[in-house]
Amino acid sequence: YEDLVKACSYIRGFDKESLHEVYQFAEQAHQGQKRASGEDFTIHPLQAALTLTSLKVDQETLLAALLHDVVEDTEVTLAEIEKRFGKAVARLVDGVTKLTRVKYRINFPDNRNENQIESLRKLLLVMAQDLRVVLIKLADRLHNMNSLSYFRPEKRVRIAKETLEIYAPLADRLGIWEIKWKLEDEAFRYLYPLEYKKLEKSIKTSMRERKVYIAKLTKILEAEARKAHLEVKVSGRTKHVYSIFRKMQTKHKELDEIYDIFALRVVVKSIADCYSMLGVIHDLWRPKPGRFKDYIAVPKANGYQSLHTTVFGVNGILTEFQIRTRQMHEEAEYGVSSHWYYKEKGRKNLGRAPTDQLGWVNSIVELQNNLQGNSEFLEGLKIDVFKDRIFVFTPQGDVKDLPVGATCIDFAYTIHTNLGHRTKGCKVNGLMVPIDTVLKTGDLVDIISSKNIEGPKRDWLNFVATSQAKSKIRAWFKDHAKEQNIKEGRQILNKKLSQVKDDLTLEKVPKAKIAKAISAMSYDNFDAILAALGEGAINATQVLKKMYSKTELLDLDGDSPSVDKLPQVLSREVVIEGESNFAFKFANCCNPQPGEGIVGYVTRGKGVSIHTDNCSSLRRLDPDRILDAQWKGQKLEPKRIRIRIEGKDRLGLMADIGGITAQTGINILASNGHIDEQDRTRFINEITIEVREFEDFEKMIYLLEKLPGIEKVRKL
C-alpha cells in the first residue's frame, strides 16, 4: 500500500485520505479470501492500481481499481459503493464487474457463449463512453496473467487465448505498448510453452553481444548528433518474445535469420529534429531499401507516431532505429491515457478518447447498430477494430483507415453507403482495377459509381473484408429481397440437413422441431428465420441446434434410442468434471431429464446446480462457474457415421482429407475412394468415421468443404 501512495505523487491535489479509506474498505470486504497462489486477495487490486499509476491515470480510476472485485466476489453492492465513494467510482466498478463476467471462447460458440458475446458488445459500448473501464480491466488482466500458473491447465489455455485475441489487441489499439507486450508474452508462455522457453533462452544467450553492439552505436550516434547541434536520448530495446515468434512464423525463418530483434530508440526535441536525425543516421549508415516508414506524417490507428528506418550498421549488421519526440514517446508508452494526464481543466471529459486519433472507438458503436448476430459482432470486432491496419487515400487526400485485406468495395462503403451500393468500377493509383482488388497502404483510391445501378451484388459478400461493408450489403438485401432471402435460406438449411442425414430435407423435419426453433430464436415464424439465414444474419448451425439436441444430431439415422426412451437407460445421477462425489441438485427452471445435454453451475454455498446446456437461465449466470457435466452411465462410445465426399480429383487430396479428420480428432475406420467412371476427373470417397461430439463432426464437414476441389460433403 505504501508503494501505491508513493506512486500517486504525479496526481495534483492527491487525496491520500480517500485512497486510504477505499483501501481499508476493500481490505475488509475481501477479508479471509485468498488468491489461487495462496496470497491475500487484496494483493490483486493493489497490483492493478500500481500498474495504472504507470499510465498516470486520475484518482477516480485508482479508487475504482482497488474496488474492482468487491461486487463480483463479496457481499458489497454497487449501491453501497456509490453511497460511500460517489457515482463516478461506482460506474467504473460496475463497468469492470460486467466486463469480468465476459468469457470469450473461439471456434464454435454454444448458447452460453452467445450470451457472453452479448455482454462483450454491451461492455465495449461502455468502453466507448469511458475508456478508464478498460484500462482497469487491462491492469486486472495483467496481474491475473502473472498468476496464471496456479490455475488448472484447461483454464490457463482459455484465459491465454482470450488475452491474446481480445485484451492484447485492445491494449495495442489504445496505444499502451508496455501492457500489450507483457500480455502477449504471458499468453504465449502458456499457449506455446516449449516454443517460449526455447526462444527466451536463445534471446538471453545473445543478450551480452547485443548490449555491446548497442553501446557502440549509441556512442557513435550521440557524437554525430552533437556535431549537428541536436539534443538526443538514445536507448536500445530487444523486441518482446511473442513479437519475434510471430515474425519467425510469418516469414518462415529461424531466430538467427531475424535481423531486427532489437531496435534503437532516438528521442529528440521537435518534429523537425526527427527528420534531421534521420539524415544523420542515413549519412552514417546505408539504409536498407523499402524499410523506411513515416508514422509521423501518417500515424498508426492507435495514434502512434515515429520515424522507422533500418540500416546496415557497424560491420554491416542490420539495425532498426525509431526516431520520435518526447511527446510521441510518452504517447507510445502511456497510450490513450497520455491525452488526459495532468489535465485539471475539463475533468468531466476524463475517460473520453481523442476522436482524431481513436476514431476506431466509434466503429464499435457502428458495429452495434449494424450487426444483429453476436457471432457476427465478435467477428466484426476482430476485423474492424483489432486486425492489422492499412492507410489509403481518397482523391481529395483524406486518409482512410482499413483492416488488412480490405478491397475497393470496403473503401467505397467507408465513404458513403450509397457510393458502396452503386459502385461500378475502381481506380487505384490512376489505373482501372477489379472492384475486389485488395488495397495496400499508400494506395490512392477513386471509386466510379453509376446511378443506373440499383444496389450491390450478393457475391460481394464473398470478398469484402470489413463488417461495415458486409452489414450494409446484407441490410440492402434484407430490405429489397425478402422472398429471395427466404429461398436462399431454405437452400442453405437443406444443405446442412443433408450433411447430417443423406435424405433429410426441411419438409421431413417434424413440425414440433420447427416450432421449437421459432420459440428458441424469438422469431415470429419460420419464414423469418429462413430470411435471416438467407441474408447472413444467422447461420444454419444455429437453427439446427435449436431444432435438435446434440444426441439427436448424431442419431438421426434412427438406430439409437430417442430422448424419450433414454430415461429407462440412464439414472438421475450425474458426473461433474469427471467426478461423482459433488453435491448437486437439479435446477427448477429447466428440470433436466436423462439424455439431455447438461452443465453444472457452482452456486454460493448450495453445491452444484444442474441445468440443461441450453437453459435460458445460463444467460444471467457467471460463465466461469459453469462446469462440464454428463449423466452417470451415459455411453461415451463414439458414433459410427458414413459420409460421402465428391469433387475434382487432384494430387494429395486423400492426404488433405486425412489431415482434417486428424485435426478434428475424428478417426477414419474405413475408406472407399474411386474415380467416377462417367467423368474421370471426378473423385468420390465414402468413409466411415468415429464421432463423439456433433461439434467435431460439424467442424470436419466445414473444413472438408474448404478444401480445393471438394464440391459436396454429406452424411449417408
Image (spheres, rainbow, N blue to C red):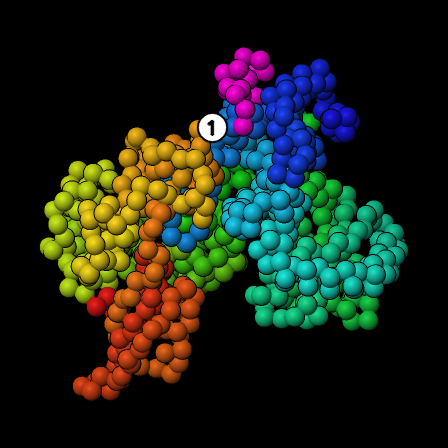
Q: Where 393 falls versus 622 (above or below)?
A: below
Q: In the displayed structure, would residue 106 be above or below residue 352? A: below
Residue of label 1:
604
Q: Is residue 479 left or right of residue 99?
A: left
Q: Report x, y in % for residue 553.
A: 25, 55
User: Which quadrant holds residue 661?
Assistant: bottom left
Relative horizontal placement of residue 80, taking residue 240 as reference (left or right): left
Of residues 572 and 641, the one drawn nearer to the viewer in this rendering = 572
Residue type highlighted by circle 1? Arg
Q: Quadrant of the N terminus?
A: top right
The quarter in which the C terminus is drawn is bottom left
Q: Is residue 457 left or right of residue 298?
A: left
The stretch in magenta equals 73-90
Say whether residue 89 is magenta. Answer: yes
Residue at (20% x, 87% y) in the render:
677
Q: Quadrant of residue 51?
A: top right
Residue 132 in the magenta stretch? The answer is no
Judge the density around disc 1: few (<14), some (14-19), many (≥20) Cα neighbours within 10 Å: few
Residue 430 lies in what quarter of the image? bottom left
Q: Position of residue 144 (x, y in %)?
A: 61, 40
What residue is rendered at 55% in x and 17% in y? Answer: 81
Q: Nearer the viewer, residue 676 or 568?
A: 568
Residue 407 in the image, given as x and y percentages of width and height: 41, 58
